[in-house]
Image (cartoon, helix red, strand yellow):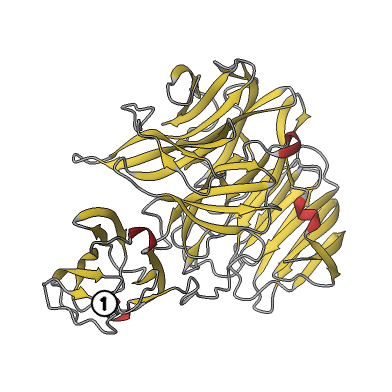
């Protein structure tokens, strides 16, 4: 049995020296490794079931980085990269590993090289046309904006493991909303804490990121504050404002800022999640904020903490997005919204307080926010495809989580109420390839439905997903209780059901290895669910409906 003696291992990286191939640390003592090469990446072996150790980067006796990392003890599940590039100096660079037993396998399996794809795992559930990180954990989309023909997506990111923790902002960019370029880490933890969710705006041609920092207190809990950073190169690099934080409070769950320019009042507005309400502020310069009002008391669903807000205008209506966890219609996290008016100071909901409206009726649609400055006055959004009930347990390994396909929002009315419509962004039509006879692991299925249409996706392992449209009840449902691997969480197998607000004529179904997204072609219904079949669904049966299958071009 491995000795439980804990130790501190110090890896000295001297860039003119060579890398020692083996490491033999002394029990309960500090050990030093001298590199043998100029490799940019130090590859850290990870074991997901291991307790967290602490990894520190020290340059000239100054602490430059500290993260909690599950260094491999008995086995290596995968590798994560410690990028040494920014730490190079004329002095000595040390990497200290604490609270990991001396006999752990990680100290024998360290590697260093320039290969960004070193030991990359080809995972069966990695999406083919959805955005996902190459390595590590991802949750909320952050700071999305469009500028000079490029869509920019930032996201909550753990570069040092595929479970939540060590929150950074990752960055990806795209010219077509489908194919994404990995632009690395944009914002890393600092003295104010880890990088929680936030947003980006464009001010005088530059990018301003506003984000929440979170740091623990000596007495338990954490302190959350709002900070800003500036970019002059379209979000490739940021400089944090020396006057941070710009907004503080004593409240718990004080986070997820969404600033936007409001031409009606010629000033910046900010909507911020605080517990179970949204607070609205105004500012002339994104630095000095004045409290205006609060919204939320007695309105909508209060089954959990309100998070990740957004506030924008579509036609003559204002829409307030409110993500909530828990409290979703089928348990866990989900996205609710409110429709009304906003005068730059106060949001007024037009529905009765007891009315709850959900943007998506699946189990795996959360943290929905929109792109700032999208072209053609579009309101384009992305969501995080997971649920906090089981997000850390889904059966992927080197990465966890993907974003939904891009969606465009609109407005429609039904029985005296105003609702937000959701349709796949037009870029998804460009992805349509040749017609196919049977489903594939990446395809779009279009079904012309009738009064009672049943759609069954299945494979040779007797795994199946059953969808059903009921015109009389005006509902659409999806049953994933026999969809494949459901063993990782008792909360995963479920049947989700959505109102259709009238008659549905056609549904569009997007399949991508581990996800199914269904839309009413007119935008009145959306449903997003993860699935983990042991082999792809390669058969479809449609009762009382016409089906057309398109391959998705990669």
Looking at the image, residue 548 lies above or below residue 308: below
Residue 178 picture quarter: bottom right
Residue 218, percent from left and from top: 19, 41
Badge 1 is on which residue? 107
Residue 540: % across, % down: 78, 68
Q: Which quarter of the figure is the N terminus placed in?
A: bottom left
Please provide percent x and percent y for residue 512: 67, 64
Seen from the viewer's position, the closer of residues 121 and 435 is 121
Q: Viewed as shown, does residue 360 lie left or right of 430?
A: left
Total labels: the figure holds: 1
Can the viewer see residue 388 in this picture?
no
319 or 133, which lies in front?
A: 133
Residue placed most toward the observer, 306 or 471:
306
State the image coordinates of residue 545 (x, y, percent, origin top left): 87, 58
| Mark 1 crowdedness (10 Å alpha carbons): few <14, some 14-19, many ≥20 | many
Secondary structure under tag 1 reads: helix
Q: Which residue, as the protein is rendered here, is positioned at the far left? A: 28
Answer above or below: position of 374 versus 286: below
């Amino acid at each position: 049995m491995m000795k439980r003696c804990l130790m501190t291992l110090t890896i000295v990286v001297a860039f003119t020296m060579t890398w020692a191939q083996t490491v033999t640390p002394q029990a309960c003592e500090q050990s030093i490794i001298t590199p043998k090469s100029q490799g940019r990446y130090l590859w850290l072996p990870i074991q997901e079931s291991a307790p967290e150790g602490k990894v520190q980067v020290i340059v000239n006796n100054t602490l430059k980085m500290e993260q909690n990392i599950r260094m491999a003890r008995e086995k290596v599940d995968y590798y994560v990269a410690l990028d040494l590039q920014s730490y190079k100096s004329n002095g000595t660079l040390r990497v200290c590993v604490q609270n990991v037993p001396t006999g752990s396998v990680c100290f024998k399996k360290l590697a260093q090289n320039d290969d960004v794809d070193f030991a990359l795992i080809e995972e069966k559930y990695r999406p083919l046309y959805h955005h996902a990180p190459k390595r590590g954990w991802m949750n909320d989309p952050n700071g999305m904006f469009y500028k000079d023909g490029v869509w920019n997506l930032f996201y909550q990111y753990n570069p040092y493991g595929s479970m939540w923790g060590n929150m950074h902002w990752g960055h990806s960019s795209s010219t077509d909303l489908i194919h994404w370029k990995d632009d690395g880490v944009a914002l890393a933890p600092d003295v104010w804490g880890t990088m929680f969710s936030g947003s980006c705006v464009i001010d005088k041609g530059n990018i301003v990121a506003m984000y929440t920092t979170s740091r623990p207190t000596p007495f338990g809990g954490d302190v959350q504050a709002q900070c800003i950073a500036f970019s002059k190169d379209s979000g490739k690099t940021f400089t944090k404002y020396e006057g941070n934080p710009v907004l503080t409070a004593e409240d718990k769950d004080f986070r997820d800022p969404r600033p936007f320019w409001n031409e009606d009042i010629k000033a910046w507005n900010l909507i911020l999640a605080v517990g179970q309400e949204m607070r609205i502020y105004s500012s002339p310069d994104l630095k000095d904020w004045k409290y205006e009002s609060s919204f939320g008391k007695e309105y909508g669903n209060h089954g959990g903490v309100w998070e990740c807000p957004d506030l924008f205008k579509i036609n003559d209506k204002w829409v307030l997005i409110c993500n909530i966890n828990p409290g979703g219609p089928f348990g866990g996290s989900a996205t609710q919204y409110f429709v009304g008016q906003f005068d730059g100071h106060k949001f007024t909901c037009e529905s009765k307080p007891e009315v709850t409206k959900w943007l998506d009726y699946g189990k795996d649609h959360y943290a929905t926010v929109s792109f700032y400055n999208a072209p053609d006055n579009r309101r384009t959004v992305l969501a995080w495809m997971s649920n906090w009930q089981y997000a850390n347990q889904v059966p992927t390994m080197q990465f966890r989580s993907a974003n939904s396909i891009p969606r465009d929002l609109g407005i429609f009315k039904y029985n005296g109420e105003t609702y937000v419509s959701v349709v796949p962004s037009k870029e998804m039509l460009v992805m349509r390839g040749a017609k196919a006879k049977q489903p594939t692991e990446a395809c779009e299925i279009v079904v012309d439905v009738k009064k009672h249409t049943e759609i069954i996706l299945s494979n040779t392992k007797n795994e199946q997903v059953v969808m059903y449209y009921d015109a009389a009840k005006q509902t659409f449902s999806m049953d994933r209780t026999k969809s494949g691997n459901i063993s990782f969480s008792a909360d995963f197998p479920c049947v989700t059901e959505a109102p259709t607000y009238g008659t549905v004529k056609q549904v569009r179904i997007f399949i991508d290895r581990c996800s199914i997204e269904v839309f009413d072609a007119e935008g009145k219904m959306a449903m997003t669910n993860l699935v983990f079949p042991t082999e792809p669904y390669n058969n479809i049966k449609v009762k009382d409906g016409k089906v057309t299958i398109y391959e998705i071009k990669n």
